[in-house]
Image: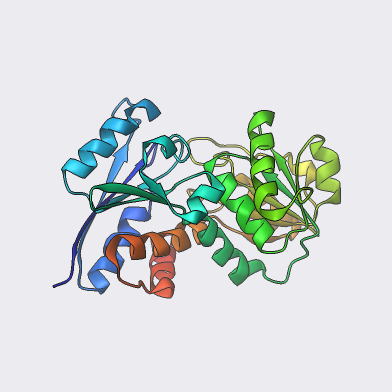
């Protein structure tokens, strides 16, 4: 008998998330009873301090697992019993599986970004890359970029100490010198082959662009993890110049592919999930 899956997503301002539909439709295609619920902190008037209660409630109601998004990917770490090697190395969790009374944290963002990058930007230059943002998603993307061969990653964050923490974390896995804290954005952009935005800037609820349009140029490739809207202001500016681009839908889909497998034990059809995501954006 196939398992019944009850999953959810904890985050703030997530009403527009495509994740529930992605999981439920793939569950339908596999003949699973698969329910996926949003646990949105904003309408509930909650913040990250509610995480202990929310996790306990989900366990008591026999949830199979939870996805975790902004702003909870790092705040959840102390509340978990075990971490996968990837989640421990990255220092952020986006997927929690409840198993045998334990809360096991995973990170599928890293794999998700890497898969989209390989499929769409596999042949780009990667000597120097600028990354905006050093939060939970930023940590996963930075690990993916260095694993995919970026030689020098320059990380900017509104909180320089957070950028420094991420650079120190990356040095443990990849050696010192491959990642550095960004100082002068204008100089960094002038020397860069690529730009990656891992901040929430560009979301429908947080419009704008993390980098002044004047710093973009046609030779640059530009990747985004925001997917609502799919074409952020940053991507629109980059495409107008003729830049190669990667939208945030790729990471959204491919992290969900792995999360589906962790929740259900079944191997999902990645191309079917990608096609379903694309059909929701037409």
Q: Which of the 4 quarters of the picture holds residue 256?
A: bottom left
Q: Which image quarter holds the N terminus?
A: bottom left
Image position of 120 with respect to 158: above or below? below
Q: Position of residue 221 (x, y in %)?
A: 72, 58
Viewer-nearest residue: 163 or 190:
163
Q: What residue lies at 79% left-to-right and 42% top-to-bottom?
A: 214
Q: What residue lies at 53% left-to-right and 35% top-to-bottom?
A: 206
Q: Position of residue 148 (x, y in %)?
A: 67, 64
Q: What residue lies at 76% left-to-right and 48% top-to-bottom?
A: 176
Image position of 136 with respect to 31: above or below? above
Q: Can residue 224 be seen in this snapshot?
A: no
Q: Position of residue 55 (x, y in %)?
A: 28, 38
Residue at the extreme left of the image, as rendered = 1
Q: What residue lies at 23% left-to-right and 69% top-to-bottom?
A: 28
Q: Position of residue 17 (x, y in %)?
A: 38, 49
Q: How many numbered discs sit on the rendered protein?
A: 0
Q: Which of the 4 quarters of the picture holds residue 4?
A: bottom left
Q: Can residue 243 be seen in this snapshot?
A: yes
Q: In the visual, does 21 lie left or right of 250?
A: left
Viewer-nearest residue: 142 or 206:
142
Image position of 126 with respect to 184: above or below? below
Q: Which image quarter holds the C terminus?
A: bottom left
């Amino acid at each position: 008998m196939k398992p019944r899956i009850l999953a959810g997503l904890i985050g703030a301002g997530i009403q527009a998330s495509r994740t529930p539909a992605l999981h439920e439709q793939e569950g339908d295609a596999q003949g699973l009873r698969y329910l996926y619920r949003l646990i949105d902190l904003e309408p509930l008037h909650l913040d990250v301090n509610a995480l202990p209660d929310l996790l306990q409630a989900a366990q008591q109601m026999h949830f199979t697992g939870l996805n975790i998004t902004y702003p909870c990917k790092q705040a959840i770490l102390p509340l978990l019993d075990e971490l996968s090697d990837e989640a421990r190395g990255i220092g952020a969790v986006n997927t929690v599986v409840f198993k045998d009374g334990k809360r096991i944290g995973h990170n599928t963002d890293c794999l998700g970004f890497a898969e989209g990058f390989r499929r769409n930007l596999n042949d780009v230059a990667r000597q120097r890359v600028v990354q905006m943002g050093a939060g939970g998603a930023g940590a996963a993307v930075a690990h993916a970029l260095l694993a995919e061969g970026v030689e020098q990653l320059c990380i900017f964050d509104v909180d320089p100490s957070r950028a420094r923490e991420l650079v120190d974390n990356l040095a443990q896995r990849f050696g010192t010198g491959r990642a550095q804290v960004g100082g002068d954005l204008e100089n960094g952009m002038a020397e860069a082959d690529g730009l990656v935005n891992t901040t929430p800037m560009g979301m429908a609820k947080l419009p704008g662009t993390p980098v002044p349009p004047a710093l973009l140029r046609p030779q640059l490739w530009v990747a985004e993890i925001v997917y609502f809207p799919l074409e952020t202001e940053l991507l629109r500016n980059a495409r107008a110049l003729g830049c190669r681009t990667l939208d945030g839908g790729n990471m959204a889909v491919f992290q969900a592919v792995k999360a589906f497998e962790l929740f259900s034990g079944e191997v999902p059809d990645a191309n079917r999930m990608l096609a379903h995501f694309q059909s929701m954006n037409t």
